Amino acid sequence: MGDAAATKERILEAGTVEFATYGIAGARVDRIAANAAINKSQIYSYFGSKDKLFDAVFDNRVDTDIANIPLDADDIPSYVAALYDMYLGDPELVRLITWARLERTPTGALFHHRGPDHDRAKLDALADAQRRGVLVDDITPEDMWSMIISLAATWAQSAIIHVADADEDTETHDRRKAALASAVRRAFCSAAEPHT
């Protein structure tokens, strides 16, 4: 990694911690620069503004986490359990999402800045699974995608009832993931077992 790439990476890492802790309005560029061991002017040189740095930090964190969990539309129950683990293992991501909702995009598409086709590949995969009879076809892929993501975040940091903690016992996490998988299977999978 060259000097410029390494500097940019240090800025993104320091920015992630700063924005996750203080939000967009409360974040300080001078703190980010100090924690990245660079001159403050380099942040503006690389990113242009504090808002653009937040966008870069946010997109980088989301892309990194999501790239590690590819969507398998034929196995939505496993996917939602993997997302649970991702949220549990990356509380900074959940805080960044929360700050983005609080300070930037209180309603509508959270990733509107990435264009209307941001989730196109995932939506197309869900639609294909619906056409093949793997998933129910009475819910649009867009609505199904939103519900899958929301279900996976049931115990994430912005949860109303209970926020999961990595220090909780394995049995508790396994129970929640099994519940998520069961709920998703019953709601979205065509071959769901009937209720008994």
Image (cartoon, grey):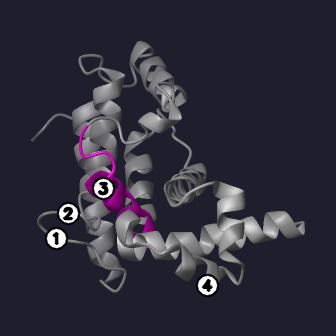
Label ID, residue 35: 4
- In the picture of the structure, the residue carrying the numbered disc 2 is 159
State left or right for residue 172 relative to residue 22: left
Mark 3: few/some/many CA within 10 Å (<14, 14-19, 20+) = few
Q: Element type at marker 1?
A: loop
Q: How far apart are labels 4 and 3 at the CA level?
A: 23 Å
Q: Going from the N terminus, do you reach mark 2 or mark 3 first?
A: 3
Label ID, residue 162: 1
Tell whether label 4 touches label 1 (CB within 8 Å).
Answer: no
- In the picture of the structure, the residue carrying the numbered disc 3 is 103
Mark 4: few/some/many CA within 10 Å (<14, 14-19, 20+) = some
Residue type at mark 4?
Answer: Asn
Outermost residue to the top: 131
Q: How far apart are labels 3 and 1 at the CA level?
A: 23 Å
Q: How far apart are labels 4 and 2 at the CA level?
A: 30 Å
Residue type at mark 1?
Answer: His
Q: Going from the N terminus, do you reach mark 3 or mark 1 first?
A: 3
Q: Going from the N terminus, do you reach mark 4 or mark 2 first?
A: 4
